[in-house]
Amino acid sequence: MFWMSIIEIVSLAIILLISIWLHEYAHAYVSYRLWDPTPKLQWRLTSNPLKHMDPIWFFMIFLIGFWWGKPVQVNPTYYKDPLKWELMVALAWPATNLILSTIGIILLLIFSKIFSLWINDIFLNNANALIMFFVNFSMINILLAVFNLIPLPPLDGFRIVKMISYNFASFVEKYTTYISIMFLILILWPGRSVVWNFLRTVSNSIFQFIFTIFATIFY
């Protein structure tokens, strides 16, 4: 990460601050609306982005290219339908990221029109910091959504496993700590290129799909 320019570092910091804040806030808000007071009692139902950031993990992005927000704690025992409502809370995260990505793409197209860029030239215009900011903003949010849907604890995609087989999920949860450590080691060292190439490929396909839909409106 040392090759990054000051502009790129500041841009990445802003993107992560907005993205991590809003998707953690989405967890807190949805759980609170489903009668769980835990997020509010822990001061996570707030518009202050710093309440949702883990300072150590936030700065790790500039060292190892990986980041993590401060997880919102919820208590499913307050839910009338624990399995279904826990899944709703979990999906609030990727849904928020996809909404943010869509907003980023719309702003990208608006500013591309302002700068009189042809649609084929948008991704070639690396010198325009504003254009690249919205490209990165959209891609990173899609990447966050895709990554978080991996069906392993403690990621939110694991809630889907719970809906399919609660007994199997309960068994896996006993080893959450070990699974989390092994997964973290995998994505940071031996399987880093394989995992991230897969995530980037899927994310890029989603980006191109959303971009194509809105590009037909603007061009």
Image (spheres, rainbow, N blue to C red):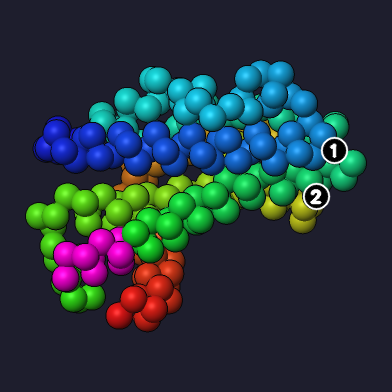
Which one is nearer the viewer's eye here, 113 or 97?
113
Residue 183 on image: x %, y %: 48, 38
In the rendered structure, the answer to whether residue 16 lies left or right of residue 26 reads left
Query: Hey, what amino acid is under mark 1?
Result: Tyr
Please indicate, yes or no, whether residue 153 appears anywhere in the rendered image.
no
Q: Please check the rendered image and state whether residue 17 is part of the magenta-colored stretch, yes or no.
A: no
* First of labels 1, 2 by sequence position: 1
Which residues lie in the magenta part? 108-116
Q: Quadrant of residue 112?
A: bottom left
Check disc 2 and report the residue beneath it.
84
Callout 1 crowding tier (Cα within 10 Å): few <14, some 14–19, many ≥20: some
Residue 82 on image: x %, y %: 84, 41
Is the Cβ of the residue at disc 1 closer than 8 Å to that at disc 2?
yes
Examine the rendered structure and indicate whether residue 15 appears above or below residue 60. Answer: below
Q: The residue tagged with tag 2: helix, strand or loop? A: helix
Check disc 1 and report the residue beneath it.
79
Q: Which mark is residue 20?
A: none
Q: Which residue reaches farthest right?
A: 80
**Residue at the image point whose x is 29% and y is 57% from the top:** 135
**Residue at the image point whose x is 37% and y is 81% from the top:** 216
Q: Quadrant of residue 13?
A: top left
- Quadrant of the drawing holding the N terminus: top left
